Amino acid sequence: MKNRTYTFTKGIGLTAFLIVVAIACKQTNSPGKETKTTTTEFLTLTHKLGEVAIAKDSKKVVALDYAALENLDQLGIPVVGMAKSHVPQYLSKYEDSDTIADLGTIFEVDYEKLSELAPDVIFISARMLKNYDELSKIAPTVYLDSEQGKELESLQHNLGVFGAIFNKKEAANTIFNSIKSSVVQLKDTVTGMNKNALIVMHNNGKFSAFGKASRFGIIHNLFGFNEAQEGLDTARHGQAISNEFIQKVNPDYLFIVDRSAVVNKTATNKEAIENVLIQQTNAFKNGKIIYLDPEAWYLSGDGATSFGIMVNEVKENF
């Protein structure tokens, strides 16, 4: 038996070590025939929800999280089942596939269908935390998440986990290094501009704002924009604000995530958002109100594909 240890950047979801254990199994075909020995390698992962052993290079993979699906897609690893509710457009090929089982939503699982699949491994994120124990009864379940303020490190860590499980370490490193390079270039450009920004989420006529320590803090931490307003609440859905608040803060750049476009599948009319007060901001006057891809920013945001989308659409709006 041979043990090997893989080391990754530590993230919120997993500790820094994965131990690979090779287990030899004997199989006799029939009396008088030669006994065959096969070897299966298992990775033991310790994350904040527990410890799980996964067969290396697992074949029957389930993704109940879009960030995980993005990373699997980037690495060319197929899935047998996924949550098909509110699938981002850039992952539509999975939603349309008849060979991939629809296992419910990113919050609720169709356990009967999942059991029938008999998966080798299941990947989840924070939206599925309450289901972890039940899912673990069906198959080894891996919890992966992104730590606020350490989004790039978390992406590296999560890609590294997939790389170890599916023998894609080199490909995972290549994907991460490409994204990191784009982030560095973007930050250099933005920092040189010395502009501030406010990122808000719009939902059914209401605004909430997000600061440096929030889920959308990469606008400031990684992309280099100064905060138009410091000290904002770090709540998952932001700090409730008014049109007057935005007018008073007067950001150079106003980034908008239209949650209604994802939840209700109908984009909000821009005229309804850019009212008289919003029109008084520098962002409006200089044409710097930027509508971000809500699927990448709100539904996912933690995977390689959405990360790339977020970098590119900010860069393209210069």
Image (cartoon, rainbow, N blue to C red):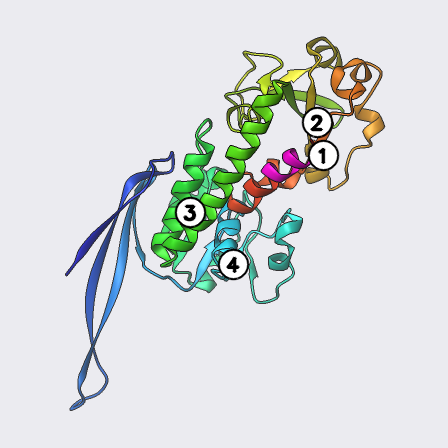
- Secondary element type, mark 4: strand
Q: Secondary structure at mark 2?
A: strand
Amino acid residing under circle 4: Gly
Disc 4 + disc 3, Cβ < 8 Å: no
> Mark on residue 62?
none
| Circle 4 crowding by C-alpha within 10 Å: few under 14, some 14–19, many from 20 | many
- Place residue 275 in its image quadrant: top right
Residue at mark 3: 159
Residue stretch rendered in magenta on the structure: 310-317
Q: Position of residue 85 (x, y in %)?
A: 62, 49
* Element carrying mark 3: helix
Whether 279 is drawn above or below 171: the answer is above
Q: Quadrant of residue 248?
A: top right
The residue carrying pointer 2 sits among few (fewer than 14), some (14 to 19) or many (20 or more) residues within 10 Å by Cα, namely some
17 on left or right of 205: left
Alpha-carbon span between mark 4 and mark 2: 32 Å
Q: Earlier in the sequence, mark 2 or mark 3?
A: 3
Where in the figure is residue 82, as x and y percent of width and height? 53, 54
Residue 146 falls within the magenta-colored stretch: no
The local crowd at label 3, few if under 14, some if 14 to 19, many if 20 or more residues have their Cα within 10 Å, is: many
Distance Cα–Cα, label 1 vs label 3: 30 Å
> Is residue 313 among what the camera can see?
yes
- In whole angstroms, how far apart are the C-alphas of marks 4 and 1? 27 Å
Q: Which residue is mark 2?
A: 202
Of badges 2 and 3, the one in the foreground is 3
Q: Is residue 171 above or below residue 218?
A: below
Q: Which residue is the site of mark 1?
A: 260
Q: Secondary structure at mark 1?
A: helix
Point out the image quarter for the N terminus.
bottom left
Please say if the residues under marks 4 and 1 sit with CB atoms less than 8 Å apart.
no
Residue at x 47% of width, y 49% of height: 175
